[in-house]
Amino acid sequence: MLFNSEAFIFAFLPFTLVAFFLVSKYLGYSFAKCWLIVASLFFYGFWNPSYLVLIVSSVVINFYLSRCILVSSGWIRKLWASIGVVSNLLVLSYFKYMDFIIININDVFELNFNLMNVVLPLAISFFTFQQISFLLDSFSEKVSEQSFLNYVLYVTFFPQLIAGPIVHHSEMMPQFSQHFRRKVNWKNINIGLLLFSIGLFKKVVLADTFSVWADTGFAQPEALKMISAWQSSLSYTLQLYFDFSGYADMAIGIALMFNIQLPLNFNSPYKSLTIKDFWRRWHMTLSRWLKDYLYIPLGGNRNGRALAIRNVIITFLLGGLWHGAAWTFVVWGAAWCSFSHSSDVGKYSD
């Protein structure tokens, strides 16, 4: 179910929103959160119900691992944290990269292993990254929230589940404990509807229009002249931005209707003057995650320029691979590395 689908706009969203506040008023806020979890799981399972087992088991296991980390100490604490992070990465790698790995093994060693044709579960990268950050913060004793109900809602909350923003537990879970959010706030609903409408316009009118021009050009690249080639390339650039930015705006607007504030994910990135500034404006929550949980733990820029460059390269390459299982994404990440080195050590500083 997509945000711009008629089923979502005219059925799922209004029914879920009205029911949330009615349940909150007559049964209590805890039941309202339970309702929101059920609605979010329905939203997720609408695409493929079989993957509900994956996300539910992932949430339960990760919450249990976080409890084990918090009550342990010394090497046992490190062991639990390692088990949690590695198991999440293994699950993500299996679903997202297994066929890519098999293809490369076949090419390098001239073998003929059959592809597994694994179907990529919806949003697995997003909810995996959120839960890894929760485990690492549990290890660093930065987690104070211990409500299982709030944790489940933090991971499954449907506005941000499919395409982000990648939210941090410290900015989301406390909101689920604030009871003033149980009541209808017409100001938030009005602003939420406005943001949703802007995002819907970006997606349906702008992105989908640019996609027609881009698809037409890329379908027959040999027939392109200079002007038409530039038109196709720029159309794809704008399609990508308005598609992703529009979806993020819709997510922020929907969440606000439920009195939940999601972080901004785009801030006019094409106004940037430097590569570093661009990545502070484009998919801001992913850049923040890569900085906090990859670049800085690697050492950031604290140990000299050479190691800082190494850390930037690793971050960009893995960030590129996060976007998809193909060498084109690795090359894309490497290209950003070279661009960033021309003016600065990288997009991140600590």
Image: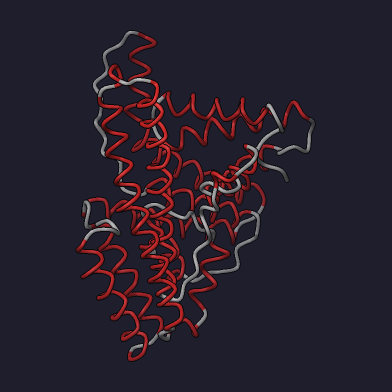
- The residue located at (26%, 22%) in the rendering is 220
Residue at position x 27%, y 74% in the image: 14
On the image, which quarter does residue 46 sit in? bottom left
Q: Is residue 19 left or right of residue 298?
A: left
Instruction: Looking at this view, name the residue that lies furthest to the top.
Output: 110
Q: Is residue 70 above or below residue 297?
A: below
| The quadrant where residue 191 appears | bottom left
Q: Nearer the viewer, residue 348 or 124?
A: 348
Q: Nearer the viewer, residue 56 or 299?
A: 299
Q: Nearer the viewer, residue 254 or 308?
A: 254
Q: What residue do we see at 64% from left, 31% from top? A: 340
Q: Residue at x 55, y 26 (%)?
A: 335
Residue 16: give x, y in percent of width and height.
Answer: 28, 74
**Horizontal and vertical percent position of residue 227:** 39, 26
Colouring scheme, one of rainbow, by chain, secondary structure, one colour: secondary structure
* Quadrant position of the N terminus in the picture: bottom left
Q: Quadrant of residue 323?
A: top left
Q: How many marks?
A: 0
Q: Is residue 224 left or right of residue 286?
A: left
Percent of width and height locating residue 349:
71, 43
Residue 76 horizontal/vertical position (percent): 60, 49
In the depicted structure, whether residue 114 falls above or below residue 152: above
**Which residue sits furthest bottom?**
26
Q: Is residue 336 above or below residue 251?
A: above
In the image, taking residue 140 as reference, residue 161 lies left or right, namely: left
